[in-house]
Amino acid sequence: MLNLNYVRDNLDLVRKALADRNFPADSLDHFVELDTERRRLISESDAINQRRNAASKEIGELMKAGLRDEAEARKAEVTAFKEQQALLDEQRSEAEAVMNDLLAGLPNIPAEDVPIGPDETANVELRKWGEPRKFDFELKDHVDLGESLGILDLERATKIAGARFAILNGEGARLSRALVNFMLDVHTRDHGYSETIPPFLVNRTALFGTNQLPKFEDDLFHIKDDRGFALIPTAEVPVTNYHADEILDVKDLPKRYTAYTPCFRSEAGSYGRDTRGLIRQHQFEKVELVKVCLPEESESEHERLTADAEKVLQVLGLPYRVVVLSTGDMGFGARKTYDLEVWLPTQNTYREISSCSNCGDFQARRMNLRFRRSGGAKPEFAHTLNGSGLAIGRTWIAILENYQQADGSIELPEVLRPYMNGIKRIG
């Protein structure tokens, strides 16, 4: 959530930032009206408080002088002042509540070096890694490959659950499990992350903390009971909220966590997009990376987190590119995002496999996540970062398509073979 004082003092900058993000700025007009009213109420309350204090002092003097009737009359005035002040304070609290609701609905301010543009067409490619393989036979996509090998069953998944679900079988299921274990090993062994297994159900407070609520209510799968649970759309939600409402010691930062979880998304608004195969599912799996760090270190930690996700693609030998997202394509809570896009030969293009975002103090403010530099220092809001390291299903797709052979089999990357009981090929 944005800092109220920052918004108040930098209205023109905030208006421009919202315009760059294609976000309507009408709510800022209401914010200004409420802030003006709030200041008026505070001023009136302070003036009444001064009169109340003066009257209370005068009552004491009247009582000392034995003027009891006059003192009682002044007491009635003090009571009236108190009631007026209570009413003004209530009105101020109501205005502040609406202001906070407005702030909760505003996206993060983009970093200064984020490219300005309306959508993904303004994203900027930063670098590429690996050379896409040239094939001398007719390519099959991951659906045809998976079904012909008996490791992917979409038809029965649809019978059981509906569209946008899949069943992985045999060595396909083992490959998915192998990817999870491989990624967790890389991030814990080589990159210094601490592994955690969080809840897969979260409450509304946690969803607000990582900005799924209130804006993205329709993207969630909600549990129908009175506890307000929802299935997690990403491990970012429970893992980033791990230290909500805490004050961390500066010596314990940065915190680096990795977690494997299933993820559940309704894909509201994606009707007709990526309907074939595993690209866009209601249920999928990820290995997530989350960091909590000092404000002055978040940019360098962002670069490191992105490099950590890239390393997985490099070791798997999957060509990819890195793009920085434009203001119009960034997620709601991000101030800067790098997307990793893996090469899919049957689509002849790169497709997103990880988004690595620096959220600054945006989420920390929502979940009251702070740190203290020294014993007597005032607590400050930490910075939070997150990224996929990687999405399991899309990595599964990329391996099938990039490592397919002329006979329809799949040669496995060497680093995965120990996780596959030593087999070198599926088929």
Image: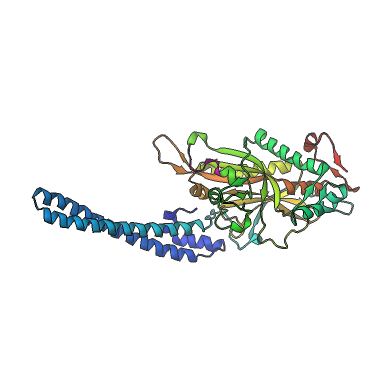
- Residue shown at the point (67%, 48%) measured from the top left: 263
Residue 244 on the magenta span:
yes
Magenta-span inclusion, residue 298: no
Q: Residue furthest left?
A: 65
On the image, the x and y values in percent for residue 254 come to: 54, 38
* Residue located 82% across and 50% down the image: 153
Instruction: Specify whether 424 is left or right of 262.
Output: right
Rendering coords of residue 358 (x, y %)? 57, 48
Instruction: Tell me which corner region of the image, top left, top right, bottom left or bottom right, holds residue 239.
Output: top right
Residue 6 visible, this angle? yes
Q: Residue at point 72% right, 61% down?
A: 273
Residue at the front extreme, as displayed: 225
Report the front residue among 229 and 183.
Answer: 229
Specify the quadrant that holds the C terminus. top right
Evaluate whether residue 301 shows in this view.
no
Residue 275 picture quarter: bottom right
- How did the renderer colour the structure? rainbow
Q: Magenta stretch?
A: 241-246
Pinpoint residue 122: horizontal percent, then vertical percent. 64, 60
Residue 303, compared with residue 282, is above or below; it is above
| Residue 110 to residue 375: above or below | below
Left or right: where 380 falls relative to 214: left
Q: Is residue 372 above or below residue 167?
A: above
Number of numbered labels in the structure image: 0
Please state if 123 lies on the left or on the right of 47 as rendered: right
Residue 34: give x, y in percent of width and height: 40, 62
